[in-house]
Structure formats: structure tokens, C-alpha cells
Image: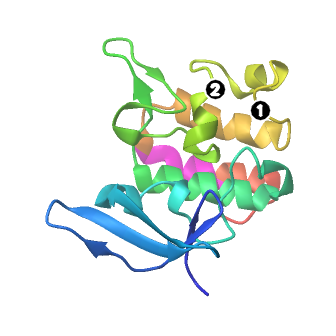
Amino acid sequence: MDGFTDQGVRLPTSADADSEGQVIWSWFDGKENQTLKAHYNQVETGPRWAPLGKLITLATLGQATAQEVFTQVKDHLLKQGKRSMVGGVGSQCAYRGKGGMQCAAGCLMSDEEAEDIPEMQSWGVLINKKYVTAFHRRLISDLQGLHDNLNNIGEWPELLEQVAYNYGLEY
């Protein structure tokens, strides 16, 4: 069955919208019928709504290939098209930023996992403090650096292509 997953729960590929633009998802979890109400934009964006079997979170990062990690981050960054930031003047990149934005590493965390992750720290620091696993450390750090250190977002496709080449991955 094609569909979507949110934290391991299968969601259908179609949904109904109410008059306020809320999407009502329904699915059967094996025991009882479930529903989820979310704003339409949440359904359209973010790795949380990735195709079934392709969602990578901190919990599944150890089973993911470098290609799967790269593809999820690349697709997320290119679709989002903005940096994930917090703060006003002197804004800084954030795993979870304003308006639901997610950085390159932040898109590899479920919403629940992200709640426990301190902002403004590099992936390497998070590994050293045991917040995240060391799987794909270099790749995720490189992707995080691309997001955090580049002001010209128009260069992301070319730089992502270079990352893919450096790691022997498909763009």
C-alpha cells in the first residue's frame, strides 16, 4: 500500500480538508481508526511527510545509507529554499527555526526528538554530548555547514552536487 508515515504510523495518500484549511487524515493503526488534523502546509513540506519507508530520524539514522541521508537533506533544502533561522538582528541558524523551518541536520529529527536537542551547537558537539549518534557524522556536518555558512541560497544546488560527488553519491 502506498502511503505516508508519521512516526511509524501509515497515513493514506489522500485527505479531506475542512473549511478552515485543515487537513483531516484518517488511517487504521491495526487496532482502531485514528485521525490527525494538521494545517495543509504541514502535509506538503518537511521530511516528516516523506514517502513510507524513507523517513530518516535520529532513531533510524543508524539504518540509513549515506545516499538516503543525502537525498532526504537535499530534497528538504531545495524544497524549503530558505535557511532555518532564529532571532532578529544577528540571526543564527537553527535545527528548528521560525515558521517551521528546519536546517540540513534538523530535517533528520522527528519533532519529538528535536525538542531535546539544544540549538546553536554543531552536529559534532551534539555527538560529543551524546544527543545524537555518530552515524554519517562527516556527511551531516558537511550538509549542515552548507546550510549554515552560505548566504546565497541560489548556490545550494551546485554545492549539493559537489557534496554528492565528494561522497560518491547520486545527485
The single residue placed furthest to the top in the displayed view is: 89
Q: Nearer the viewer, residue 86 or 90?
A: 86
Circle 1 is placed at which residue position?
A: 132
Q: Nearer the viewer, residue 5 or 73?
A: 5
The single residue placed furthest to the bottom in the displayed view is: 1
Examine the rendering and report whether any part of residue 105 can be seen: no
* Amino acid bearing label 1: Val
Q: Identify the magenta region.
A: 154-161
Circle 2 is placed at which residue position?
A: 117
Task: Specify the label residue 58 is tagged with.
Answer: none
Q: Is residue 66 rendered magenta in the image?
A: no
Q: Are marks 2 and 1 in contact (CB under 8 Å)?
A: yes
Give the colouring mode of the picture.
rainbow
Residue 90 sits above or below residue 62 on the image? above
Left or right of 134? Residue 29 is left
Q: Residue at x 51, y 62 (%)?
A: 49
Examine the rendering and report whether any part of residue 130 can be seen: yes
Left or right of 53? Residue 166 is right
Q: Main secondary structure of the magenta part?
A: helix
Measured as percent of width and height from the top left, residue 110 is found at: 60, 45
Number of labels in the image equals: 2
Q: Residue at x 71, y 54 (%)?
A: 69
Q: Residues within 10 Å of mark 1 (few under 14, many from 20)?
A: some
Q: Residue at x 33, y 38 (%)?
A: 99
Disc 1 on helix, strand or loop? loop
Q: Quadrant of the C terminus?
A: bottom right
Measured as percent of width and height from the top left, residue 93 is found at: 49, 25
